[in-house]
Amino acid sequence: MEFIKYEVEGAVGVITIDRPKALNALNSAVLAELDATLDAVDLAAVRCLILTGSGEKSFVAGADIGEMSTLTKAEGEAFGKKGNDVFRKLETLPIPVIAAVNGFALGGGCEISMSCDIRICSDNAVFGQPEVGLGITPGFGGTQRLARLVGPGMAKQMIYTARNIKADEALRIGLVNAVYPLAELMPAAKKMAAGIAKNAPIAVRNCKKAINEGLEAGMDEAVVIEEKLFGDCFESYDQKEGMAAFLEKRKVEAFLNK
Ligand code: CAA
């Protein structure tokens, strides 16, 4: 891999987008490598992922403007699909993904962070959807996920004005969950990931599915989605161990992902 680094530490995988010359901008090659990396995650062993960018300045500065500059209508649509397909794979991965946003998260960078389950950022982070200033719409899910995350009014303001926001404002509008000094961002992400990884993996997976699929459904259908995923847990060894440990007033020996 030229542009993606993937390291596993215990049950936590760290994916780093590493294209420093272009502030980690997403071209077709980066997207293809990210897609292959997601396919290769060992879901039996890895229980949480962290996604970050290399360097101290940028998480992802967007889709590659050079590559997009000469696209035709059909090629533009295909490029949007390429990004959307990878981001959807990330969003629906059966394990949680934490975006550790370490600088610029513009356009496709903001969009990839929103495809993750949780966003935390460094105090130098900058978020924005600058596309209309380039003559395009957000194309990797920004019009959809930003509106769902921060509400349509704030999403429309950010997208129509193309104004970037700093970390404190991203925190205020709920785009990120927490802000850290840059040096503390990865330790905080790893601590959160380890906290997730120690819980029952089937239960965590079902929670992700219930939240994601429930948000797309009406409430009557959504609670049924939850009931089924709740019921599924009772077939797992981990439910038996988790509840037995509570009743026997002891610590869980181990969740075995079964
Ligand atoms: N695409 C391609 N190259 C990019 C890039 C991008 N999105 N962002 C930065 N780069 C490149 C720059 O061209 C520059 O390359 P050279 O050194 O070869 O000139 C290098 O990265 C460093 O960038 P700057 O010199 O501009 O660094 P800066 O500190 O002065 O500014 C910045 C940083 C504010 C992030 C600025 O680079 C910038 O505005 N980048 C573009 C951000 C943007 O508009 N992103 C949205 C893209 S559209 C999109 O993503 C569509 C979609 O939804 C799919």
Image (tube, rainbow, N blue to C red):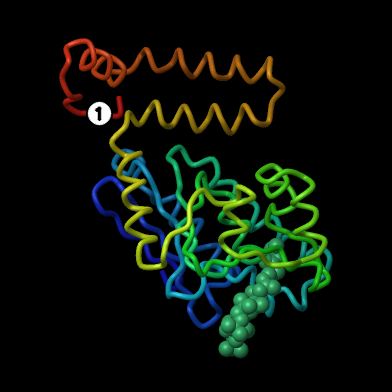
Using the image as rendered, state which of residue 171 and residue 189 is in the foreground.
171
Q: Quadrant of residue 79?
A: bottom right
Q: Quadrant of residue 231?
A: top left
- Kindly state the secondary structure of the residue where label 1 is placed: loop
Number of marks in the image? 1
Q: Quadrant of ligand 1?
A: bottom right
Label 1: which residue?
256
Using the image as rendered, state which of residue 10 and residue 177 is in the foreground.
177
x 28%, y 36%: residue: 198
x 48%, y 52%: residue: 178
Q: Is residue 148 left or right of residue 8?
A: right
Compared to residue 197, the image places residue 53 above or below, namely below
Compared to residue 181, the image places residue 240 above or below, namely above
Q: Is residue 79 visible?
A: no
Compared to residue 152, the image places residue 58 above or below, namely below
x 41%, y 53%: residue: 50
Pointer 1: residues within 10 angstroms few (<14), some, or many (20+)? some
Q: Measured from the top left, where is residue 39 in percent x and y?
A: 45, 50
Q: Is residue 92 left or right of residue 183?
A: right
Q: Is residue 47 visible?
A: yes
| Image quadrant where one finds the C terminus | top left
Q: Measured from the top left, where is residue 30 in percent x and y?
A: 53, 67
Specify the amino acid type for callout 1: Leu
Q: Is residue 175 left or right of residue 52?
A: right
Q: Residue furthest bottom?
A: 21
Q: Measured from the top left, where is residue 162 in percent x and y?
A: 76, 66
Q: Is residue 146 left or right of residue 180?
A: right
x 39%, y 17%: residue: 233
